[in-house]
Structure formats: C-alpha cells, structure tokens
Amino acid sequence: MFSGYSDGEKVYKTTDAGATWVNVSNGLPNIPMNTVVYRKNSLYDEVYIGADLGVYAIDNNVSSAVPFLTDLPKCAVQDLEIFYPTESTGIIRAATYGRGSWQANLSTGPLVTLGTDEVAGLSSQAPVLYPNPVSNGVLNVKLVNTDSNYVYYLYNLLGEQVLKGTLDVSNSVISLKDKAAGTYILRMISQDKMYTQKVLVK
C-alpha cells in the first residue's frame, strides 16, 4: 500500500509470501491510502482500505475497488480493524482524523450486492428509478429531498463496472441504450449517502 499521489499505484497483493506482487489499484482514486485490513474467513477474499476520503473495498467478485460508505463517513480514515462476533460475521471499525471512531456491519455476500445497501436503497430518501425494468434504453432517476450531486456506478452481475457518471437535479437520466439485456447493479454515492439498487434492462 502506498500513501501518496502516484495514480494507479495504491495497493498491491501477493499470494506467494511476497515473491511476486499484483497491482489491485483499479477503481481507487488518486489520494493517499492510509491503512488496509483483510477480512479473514471471507468467501470472497475481501480487503478494506482506509483512504483520505473514506473506506474502499475490493474482493475477488469485482474488477475494481468500490467505495464502502455504509454507516461510515467520507473522511480521512487512519486505521481499520475487523472484529468477528461469529466465524461468519464481521464488524469493521474505522478511526478517522477529526471525526472519531465508527463501525459498520459487514455483509456476508459479495461487495457488489452489499445487502445492507439494498435495504437502504428502498428507504424513503433513496433515489427513485423509473421505468424499471428499462425497455427504451433510458433510466430516469428522481433525486429525493437532496441538493447533493451523485456519482453513479453500474455493474454487471460479474462485478464488472460497465458505466460511470454523475447525477444532479438538472441531469437525472442514465442512458442504457448500448447495454445488453439483463440485470445490473446501480450504485449511487453522494457526499454522505450511498444507495444500491437493481436495474433490469429488457
């Protein structure tokens, strides 16, 4: 892990006790990375990275790192630790610079689905997607009770990022005209919230 501003050179992993290293920085922003923790007993080899703008996560189900903001702030994270109430569950705790300590329950599924986000995505504050299923290649997004801009990421069910863009009150349409029919995962992130919802393209 590197705590600097070398773009694309943030986190490396090894599977042979350090003999060789593989760059796994895809999806990480060009900001300092401060700490990294591996989730033991994980089915997906999850790794969580504390950065100057919150926590990011990588597992072997996604092709790039994704922001992990469930119950965690988007600020400088100096230290991470995972506690294990049971063998299959985990609680991640983050020590921040200036905003205290936080914790969040970890999902038992792959990162792209993040079960806790699915519930949050159905709350009254979540953006409303329509029509869903999408039949004409255009997905409208109604932003609810917010002046914040959102960055969105669209993933296929292999965990591959297939689209990225921004949403605000003046631009709330996502074009899916070139996307194959199937199920996708749409993740929308604002300054302090993150929602994940399924999108069906016909």
Image (tube, rainbow, N blue to C red):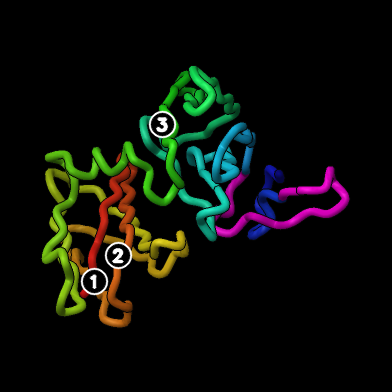
- With respect to residue 16, does 99 lie above or below? above
Q: Nearer the viewer, mark 2 or mark 3?
A: 2
Q: In the rendered view of the protein, which quadrant contains the N terminus?
A: top right
Tag 3: amino acid: Leu
Q: Which mark is residue 183?
A: 2
Q: Residue at x 33, y 53 (%)?
A: 187
Q: Residue 119: percent from the left, percent from the top? A: 24, 39
Say which mark, if any, is on residue 187: none
Q: How many other residues sit within 10 Å of disc 2, few (<14), some (14-19) or many (≥20)?
A: some
Q: Image check: 93 left or right of 2?
A: left
**Quadrant location of residue 120?**
top left
Q: Is residue 154 magenta?
A: no
Between disc 2 and disc 1, whose residue precedes?
2
Crowdedness of circle 1 by 10 Å Cα count: few (<14), some, many (20+)?
Answer: many
Q: Is there CB contact under 8 Å for labels 2 and 1?
A: yes
Q: Which quadrant: the C terminus? A: bottom left
Q: Which residues are magenta?
A: 13-32
Most foreground residue, 24 or 106? 106
Q: In whole angstroms, how far apart are the C-alphas of marks 1 and 3? A: 31 Å
Q: Which residue is mark 3?
A: 72
How far apart in space, not on screen, are marks 2 and 1 (Cα)? 6 Å
Write the residue at 42% across / 36% down: 107
User: Of callouts 1 and 3, which one flags the residue occurring earlier in the amino acid sequence?
Assistant: 3
The residue wearing badge 1 is 201
Residue type at mark 1: give it.
Val
Residue 193 placement, left or right of 12: left
Element type where label 1 sits in the image = strand
